[in-house]
Structures are given as structure tokens and as C-alpha cells.
Image: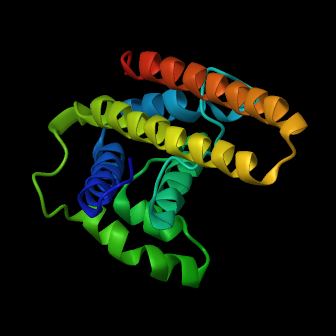
Amino acid sequence: MTDTSADLDDTIRLELEFLTSLVWAPAAVSLAAVHALVGGRDDRDPSSRDVLPVDTELFLRPVHTAVFAAVVARTDAGLPVTPTLLTESIADPKEKASLRSVLLDIAAPSGAGPLPGGADVAHLAVALIDHWYRRGYPTLLARMSLACEESPTADLADFWRALTDHQQIAEARWLSVRQRLMLV
């Protein structure tokens, strides 16, 4: 199954809605959501099965990844997160220019906007993590298909084992993050 244009548009819209709700939520809700997704600054371990590594490709759009990274950096530093403060915290003029339209969309949502009090943050984060997890399966199948075409037969079992290990780590993270988000 391949992503259709509508599927991609829906995922990109979800990403922006999540970021908007995250930025507009009360600080405690934003902090809890960030910690549920990637853990706290002092307890991040790339081998953890409880949270996503901070460099996980959670978003399809690189600009969304950059905004999330800025949110994580501000929450790690104990600083407030607002659209204006996010914009001002980006020192590189090129990066600031590339993020301007997304930050404007977050500052002035054109749709319904986030629910008051951050009520939608956890639900949008769950949908986002579900999209991330689901995208992994076609990638896993494509990698195994490529291995079947290009690798020696004797290497296929090891390749499959490595992909299975990767899938099981992703599943553990997906389940853990979903459970943690339900507590936000």
C-alpha cells in the first residue's frame, strides 16, 4: 500500500495541528508531551525502548522537525514555548526564514486552532506516533525486498533478523509512548 496524496496531506496537516496544539498548550502539558515522546533532557538514551530517540524521523516535513526540535530545546532549558519565543530562539537567519511560514501558521492557525488548555495535545500526539509507526512497515518490507534482490541467499536470514529486531524496538517504543501520552 502506498501513500496517496490525500494521505500525505492528512499527515502533514496532523503534524502542523500537533505542533500548534503543543505550542499553545500550558507549559506543563507541553513539557509532559515532550517527555512522553522523547524523554527528558537528562534521561534520554538512544537505546531506550520507552521513548523515541530525539532524532527519530517523526515528521514528514523537515520544517516540522525543526520546529519540534526548537520546542524540545526550549522545554529542555526550562524556557516558555510560544510562537514568538520560538522564532526569536532560532539564531540562524536562513533557518529562521525557512521556518517563518510554519511559525506563522502556528501563531495564527487558519483552522479551528488548538483546544483551550491543551486538551488535544495528547490525542494529536497519539495520532502522530501511530502515523510514524505505520510508515515503518512499508519501509521494512521495501528493505527486505531489496535484500532479496541484491543480497546473497546465505545473508537473508541475518538481514530478516535485523529487521525484526528493529521492528520489535519500534513496537516497544510505539506502545510505551502511547501509554505515556495517555497520562498527559
Q: How many marks?
A: 0
Residue 158, by quadrant, is top right
The residue under the point 27% across, 50% down is 17
Task: Judge whether 130 appears above or below 68 on screen.
Answer: above
- Residue 41 coordinates in the image, percent (x, y): 67, 35
> Visible in this render: residue 30?
no
Left/right of residue 146 with respect to residue 181 in the rendered view: right
Residue at image location 16% in from the left, 38% down from the top: 116
Nearer to me, 71 or 150: 150
| Residue at 23%, 59% in the rendered image | 6
Lateral position of residue 109 relative to residue 69, left or right = left
Q: Percent position (x, y) of residue 76?
A: 60, 41
Residue positioned most to the left: 112
Residue at the spot 28% in from the left edge and 45% down from the top edge: 21
Which quarter of the figure is the C terminus placed in?
A: top left
Give how far across and how far down residue 71 sits, in percent. 49, 50
Relative to 2, does residue 110 appear above or below in the rendering?
A: below
Q: How is the image coloured?
A: rainbow
From the viewer's side, name the closer residue of 99 and 93: 99
Q: Position of residue 22 (x, y in %)?
A: 35, 44
Residue 173 in view (yes/no) = yes
Q: Nearer the viewer, residue 59 or 25?
A: 59
